[in-house]
Image (cartoon, rainbow, N blue to C red):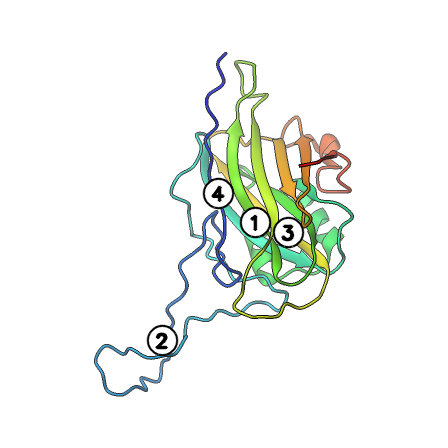
């Protein structure tokens, strides 16, 4: 069978305060000052930046769960993402597969308290049609985060969909936040990717993560089905399926 050309979907993000739940950055909020204070001009033009957002204290921006990307690879109905962080740095880049609420509970237990935005993102997931892939690596300071750069569905060699896999490319990138200085805290930076499928969700994952030093790591995860819990135990754990590849 002839493999179709790979369709790329760039999912970069512009800044920490402009991140959205989709694979592209959301439009910044245009909040009004509310007090109507101005110089009387009908256009209300002023210098205020009333669109500034607040976070939950861990650096994770608020996201719009309704944000959608405009173009998706065949087989995907939707794709949304949510950044997350925790203070303990991981030894190497890792990826995890969350197929149901039990997986989600174990994932939270391993990573401690997360922001309300992260909790809501997971709670709103319909695991009948969607999966969540957790991508994470070490960030050298608070100006770095995990960015999703490409998502696609790679078709296998067989005529069935059993060999099809969801392919994701991600990288640890420095994201300017308008400040000249970054907090010098080494931590884990991650991103949850929720993929919603038009048919049965895929449970084979291929992830490539470029770490803070520019080194590429390939990670593969496979589960026989959404109910195959025995084969999923390592999917969000120590990253035993990881393989590092020099770039």
Asked whether the viewer can see residue 173, the reply is yes
Give the residue pinned by disc 3.
190
Comes first in the chain, label 1 or label 3: 1
Asked whether the viewer can see residue 98, the reply is no
- The front one of 112 and 152 is 152
Mark 4 is surrounded, within 10 Å at the Cα level, by few (under 14), some (14 to 19) or many (20 or more) other residues, namely many
Mark 3 is surrounded, within 10 Å at the Cα level, by few (under 14), some (14 to 19) or many (20 or more) other residues, namely many
Give the residue pinned by disc 2.
32
- Residue 211 in the image, given as x and y percentages of width and height: 67, 46
Circle 4 SS class = strand
Comes first in the chain, label 2 or label 4: 2
Alpha-carbon span between mark 3 and mark 4? 16 Å
Give the residue pinned by disc 4.
79
- Residue 196 in the image, given as x and y percentages of width and height: 50, 39
Circle 2 SS class = loop
Comes first in the chain, label 2 or label 3: 2
Do tag 2 and tag 1 residues touch (Cβ < 8 Å)?
no
Mark 2 is surrounded, within 10 Å at the Cα level, by few (under 14), some (14 to 19) or many (20 or more) other residues, namely few
Residue sitting at x 39%, y 39%: 71
> For residue 43, what is the image quadrant?
bottom left
Marker disc for residue 147? 1
Alpha-carbon span between mark 1 and mark 4? 14 Å
Do tag 1 and tag 4 residues touch (Cβ < 8 Å)?
no
Comes first in the chain, label 2 or label 1: 2
Mark 1 is surrounded, within 10 Å at the Cα level, by few (under 14), some (14 to 19) or many (20 or more) other residues, namely many
Mark 3 or 4: the one toward you: 3
């Amino acid at each position: 069978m002839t493999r179709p050309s790979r369709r790329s979907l760039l999912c970069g993000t512009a800044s920490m305060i402009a991140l959205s739940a989709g694979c592209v950055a959301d439009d910044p909020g245009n909040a009004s000052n509310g007090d109507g204070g101005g110089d009387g001009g009908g256009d209300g033009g002023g210098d205020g930046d009333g669109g500034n957002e607040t976070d939950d204290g861990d650096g994770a921006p608020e996201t719009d769960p309704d944000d959608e990307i405009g173009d998706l690879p065949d087989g995907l109905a939707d794709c949304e993402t949510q950044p997350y962080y925790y203070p303990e740095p991981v030894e190497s880049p890792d990826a995890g597969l969350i197929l149901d609420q039990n997986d989600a509970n174990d994932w939270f237990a391993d990573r401690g308290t997360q922001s309300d935005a992260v909790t809501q993102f997971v709670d709103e997931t319909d695991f009948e049609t969607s999966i969540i892939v957790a991508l994470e690596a070490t960030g050298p300071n608070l100006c770095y985060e995990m960015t999703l750069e490409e998502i696609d569905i790679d078709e296998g060699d067989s005529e069935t969909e059993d060999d099809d896999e969801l392919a994701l490319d991600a990288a640890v990138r420095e994201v300017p936040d308008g400040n000249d200085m970054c907090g010098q805290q080494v931590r884990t930076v991650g991103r949850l990717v929720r993929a919603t499928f038009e048919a049965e969700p895929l449970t084979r994952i291929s992830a490539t993560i470029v770490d803070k030093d520019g080194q590429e790591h390939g990670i593969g995860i496979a589960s026989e089905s959404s109910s195959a819990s025995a084969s999923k135990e390592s999917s969000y754990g120590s990253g035993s399926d990881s393989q590092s590849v020099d770039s």
